[in-house]
Every structure is written in structure tokens, then in C-alpha cells.
Image: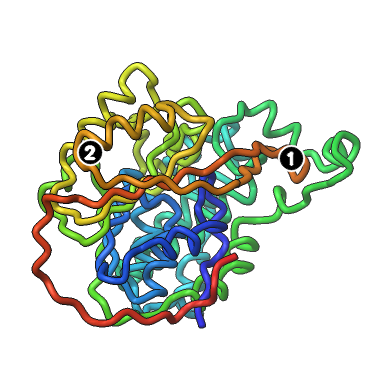
């Protein structure tokens, strides 16, 4: 049995991935996870034997998918670890751009060395797995697990005495090394890799560039929830900068702007003809509202159902949570021509909570 590793991704559907996949019809054998993020839903679907196609516009999310969804058997071994962590820290892109912005200068030098070394790994799967683990290490050292704080606040929150005085927790893990966090999670990531005997594929693109070419029984849509804490470029764009050694720019079609959200959803729904079933995750704190989304979806199908479930989003600590209702919109595309035959599904992973 296989288990989804600790990815620590805001908005992750890990806690409700099983519930969502339980709603998939028996005649569905392929899934396109169009906003795959941390890949918890894709991982659950892979466990159930579906052929999974993932997409995310963030490069780090592509690498998570390439490491955990498309990768069938490639692990990081001891020689790989020696390669990644060999040599002396160096002054490179991270040092020049982000020293005393997100990390201390010596830490940025370490990241620059590790980035150079990851390029020496022998396969793309190994590189993706290394990027996913380095992301986990970078996130563990960052207060609130996102790159949206200013440097003074980061320094303050990484002060263990201040943290203990203020929160009764020293949070020593913020000051443990990247290598420590990488190695602490290595076995869990390696053990999460398996084959479900399907040709799973990962994409890294704007969703609107793929809808005419990717075909699947189900498309699962989990876009940023407009009007909520949903700035994924702000949360994780720094990791893309680390990967590309470039200062990346915010992307279009990001579902952040309320002024364009309804038009963007309508444009999205109008292009889903390649999919027999549409599944959309959203919640009651977001815009558009449940009723507005229903109106939009009913332009394209008379067969629309909404399921609801309470779901808590932990934001800043174990006591402060946003309690919301999660909506799952289920649409049957009545104009879809279903002619393909597929093999029987089978479950190979641990059940999700």
C-alpha cells in the first residue's frame, strides 16, 4: 500500500481526496486534473487505477506531478544524495536576488549549490523528485509555509525565543538545515512512488492551452478560490525562481480577480467538450457564489449536481481555522461521444482520511 507524502500545500485536497474520488462514476477510467497543485487528488486517483493527466502552471507543481504521478519506479539513492549535497556553498541566483529577502545569505548560497548539483542527476524523474523534496525543505524553513512575509517578520518568527514567548513554541524546525529537512522526508517520498500500470502524464501550461488537445473521461477543476487566500504565485513562485534561476512573473488566467472571475469561468466551461464528466471544487467563502456557478454550468448541461461537505482550512495555527463548506459540482456532458473502452480499475494505495 502506498501513501501520499507530506507536501504541505495550501488548499490541498488531501483530507477530502477520497471523498471526491468516491463520487467518480464507474465508467470513468481517465482523469485530467487541470489545476493539480500538490497532486493529492491525482495521487488518490492514481491509487485507484485511473490513468491520470495532471497540469499546473507553476513549474514546481509540474515537478511534484512528475515525481509522484508519472514516475513509476525511479527513486533517489545514496549516490544521488551525495551529488546533491556535495561541494561548497556558492554565490548564485538565489544569493543575488533573495539573500535577506526570504533566507539568510548562507542559506541562499547553499540553495545555489544544490540547484547546480540537481542538474547533474541522471534522469528527469530524479531531478523532479529532488525539486519536490527541496521545495518541502524550503517550506519547512519558512514561517507560515508561504513566501508572502517580509524579511523583518521572517527573522522575528525564526527567533526561537521570540516564538516561545509569543506562541509558547520555539519552532526550531525553521532553523534546521535544508539538508536536514530533505533527508527527513526522503524515505517518505521514495516510498510513495509506484506504478499503476497506466501512462500517466504531467503538463506545465496554462489550462486554456490544453483543453483542445487533452481528452479524458473526467476533468477535475480545483482553481484558486476567488476572493479567498488564493495567491499561489505569491505562495510558491519563489520555488519556480529557484528552479529556473530567473525572477518569474505572475501568470494570466489566475482566477484571482473578482472582476474577471465569472467571465473566466464561463470561458473555461465553454471549452470542456473533450470530457464526459466535469468535477469542480469550490467553497462557500469564494466568488462566484454557488448559485452563480450553477447558472453558468447549466448553460452547458441540464445534468448538474452539487454535493456539500464541511471542510476546515488551517491558516495560521492549530487553533485558528476557517470553517467552510466545500462544494463539489458534478456535471455530465450530455453532448459527449463516449466510444473508448478501458481496463478495469484497481486500488493500490492506503485510504485517505
Disc 2 residue crowd, few under 14, some 14–19, many 20+, Cα 10 Å: some
Report whether residue 273 is seen: yes
For residue 92, the mark is none
For residue 158, the mark is 1
Residue 3 placement, left or right of 46: right
Q: Residue drawn 36% across and 47% down?
A: 305
Residue farthest to the top, as pictured: 259
Q: Nearer the viewer, residue 283 or 14?
A: 283
Vertical placement of 248 versus 275: above or below?
above
Vertical placement of 87 versus 232: above or below?
below
Residue 261 placement, left or right of 136: left
For residue 269, the mark is 2
Q: Residue drawn 47% across and 41% down?
A: 236
The location of residue 166, given as percent across then percent down, is 87, 34
Q: Nearer the viewer, residue 183 or 269?
A: 269
Report whether residue 97 is seen: no
Q: Nearer the viewer, residue 260 or 164?
A: 260
Amino acid at each position: 500500500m502506498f501513501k501520499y507524502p507530506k507536501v504541505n500545500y495550501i488548499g490541498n485536497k488531501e483530507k477530502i481526496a477520497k471523498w471526491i474520488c468516491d463520487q467518480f462514476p464507474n465508467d470513468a477510467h481517465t482523469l485530467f486534473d487541470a489545476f493539480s497543485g500538490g497532486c493529492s487528488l491525482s495521487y488518490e486517483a492514481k491509487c485507484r487505477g485511473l490513468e491520470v493527466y495532471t497540469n499546473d502552471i507553476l513549474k514546481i507543481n509540474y515537478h511534484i506531478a512528475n515525481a509522484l504521478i508519472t514516475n513509476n519506479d525511479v527513486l533517489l539513492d545514496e549516490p544521488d544524495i551525495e551529488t546533491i549535497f556535495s561541494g561548497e556553498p556558492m554565490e548564485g541566483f538565489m544569493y543575488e536576488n533573495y539573500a535577506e529577502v526570504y533566507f539568510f545569505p548562507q542559506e541562499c548560497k547553499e540553495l545555489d549549490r544544490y540547484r547546480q548539483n540537481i542538474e547533474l542527476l541522471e534522469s528527469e524523474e530524479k531531478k523532479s523528485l529532488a525539486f519536490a523534496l527541496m521545495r518541502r525543505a524550503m517550506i519547512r524553513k519558512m514561517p507560515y509555509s508561504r513566501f508572502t512575509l517580509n524579511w523583518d517578520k521572517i527573522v522575528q518568527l525564526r527567533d526561537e525565543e521570540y516564538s516561545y514567548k509569543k506562541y509558547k513554541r520555539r519552532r526550531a524546525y525553521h532553523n534546521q538545515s535544508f539538508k536536514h529537512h530533505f533527508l527527513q522526508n526522503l524515505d517518505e517520498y521514495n516510498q510513495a512512488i509506484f506504478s499503476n500500470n497506466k501512462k500517466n502524464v504531467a503538463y506545465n501550461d496554462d489550462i486554456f492551452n490544453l483543453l483542445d488537445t487533452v481528452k479524458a473521461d473526467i476533468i477535475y477543476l480545483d482553481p484558486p478560490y476567488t476572493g479567498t487566500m488564493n495567491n499561489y504565485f505569491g505562495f510558491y513562485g519563489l520555488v519556480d525562481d529557484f528552479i529556473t534561476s530567473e525572477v518569474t512573473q505572475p501568470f494570466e488566467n489566475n482566477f484571482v480577480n473578482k472582476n474577471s472571475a465569472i467571465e473566466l469561468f464561463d470561458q473555461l466551461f465553454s471549452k470542456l467538450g473533450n470530457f464526459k464528466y466535469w468535477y469542480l471544487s469550490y467553497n462557500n467563502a469564494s466568488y462566484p457564489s454557488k448559485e452563480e456557478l450553477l447558472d453558468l454550468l447549466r448553460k452547458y448541461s441540464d445534468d448538474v449536481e452539487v454535493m456539500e461537505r464541511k471542510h476546515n482550512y488551517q491558516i495560521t495555527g492549530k487553533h485558528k481555522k476557517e470553517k467552510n463548506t466545500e462544494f463539489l459540482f458534478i456535471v455530465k456532458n450530455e453532448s459527449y461521444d463516449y466510444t473508448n473502452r478501458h481496463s478495469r480499475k484497481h486500488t493500490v494505495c492506503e485510504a485517505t482520511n
